Image: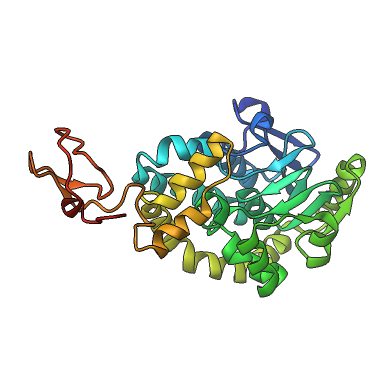
Amino acid sequence: MSQFDPRPAQEFVFDEIRYEKRDGVARVTINRPEVYNAYSTKTLHEMTRAFQDASWDDGVAVVVLTGEGEKAFCTGGDVTEYQRDFLRRPRDYWKWMGVFVACHDLLRNIGKPTIARLNGMVVGGGNEFNMACDLAVMADHATIRQVGTRVGSVAAGGATQWLPIMVGDRRAREMLFTCDAIDAATALDWGLVNRVVPYADLDQAVDELCAKMIDKFPECTRYTKQQVNFWKDLSWNMTVGHAKEWLALHYTSLEPWEGMTAFVEKRQPDYRGVRQRAAEGGSSEFVWGPYTGTCPACQAKGIPSEFTHCGRCGAEMAPEASGEAGS
């Protein structure tokens, strides 16, 4: 037996995805409907294992990626996890991004046609997984949107790279800057999906596309995929490493803290307050100002400039010692 021989799908034990192989089609379903199929670190690991198996299985001709239920395909990364873990340890986001990039690279280079079955909301990183697939079939009730600038992040895990290629520069900028949702008819008109059908017809439409691709030569299909990946690969490989570094550093600043804390607290982020702080000469980069204060009593250094008292000994901080008098 070769080390590359595939395993039956039922041998895999997954908690956050479902994996099925039948009649030449491998189906990967993000199974977290309670959070609208947002992916956690564990989800990405499980998706990667499934994609690897589907890639090596010569009995698989097509891979379908979808989400559980009819409300959401995928709503991107789990912001609760981001807020809980990465605001405290930004360096761990760099590690997480490595998991994310590996999952995307395997999906994009899986060697078989891939179809995004868009069964509901497609949000943030969910749209990046949609765009990583070769084709997309969308239910007519679904919508697509990017949300990076709403939550204190940048959609540089595929959206900033691939949206201009797929929908054009102006439309890409509109989606990325406004974070407005586009409906299924618009997504079809813009070329972001291949088919829009009623939800009741979604599986039939996906199955019809699968059948068309099964009845083609596999080696020719694999190389065709490699060729048409060129522009996606170019833009991705030129930028995603930089995104990994910048986003990890960005987790130390005010914007992700405010955006993701607001998400968890179910409130509107204070966008204008952040802008006002900068306009008035204060700090829009740090939650409590830059670490410029020195305690006059215990000489502790690196105290946030907006602290009125030392966090070490409790002594009152004079305005001039805080580094931002009047802020």
- The answer to whether one can see residue 212 in this image is no
**Residue 158 x %, y %:** 58, 59
**Residue 6 x %, y %:** 62, 37
* Above or below for 109 versus 10: below
As rendered, which of 139 and 16 lies closer to the eye?
A: 139
What's the residue at 92%, 43% (across, down)? 201
As rendered, which of 194 and 9 lies closer to the eye?
A: 194
In this rendering, position of residue 21 left or right of residue 87: right
* Above or below for 191 versus 78: below
In this rendering, position of residue 85 left or right of residue 26: left
As rendered, which of 210 and 101 lies closer to the eye?
A: 101
In this rendering, position of residue 206 left or right of residue 321: right
**Residue 77 x %, y %:** 56, 43
Farthest-out residue, bottom: 169
The C terminus is located in which quarter? Answer: bottom left
**Residue 144 x %, y %:** 73, 53
What's the residue at 61%, 44% (across, down)? 51
The N terminus is located in which quarter? Answer: top right
Where residue 227 sits, quadrant-wise, is: bottom right
Where residue 56 sits, quadrant-wise, is: top right
* Above or below for 291 versus 40: below
What's the residue at 64%, 51% (across, down)? 129
- The answer to whether one can see residue 221 in this image is yes
What's the residue at 40%, 54% (across, down)? 250
As rendered, which of 322 and 29 lies closer to the eye?
A: 322
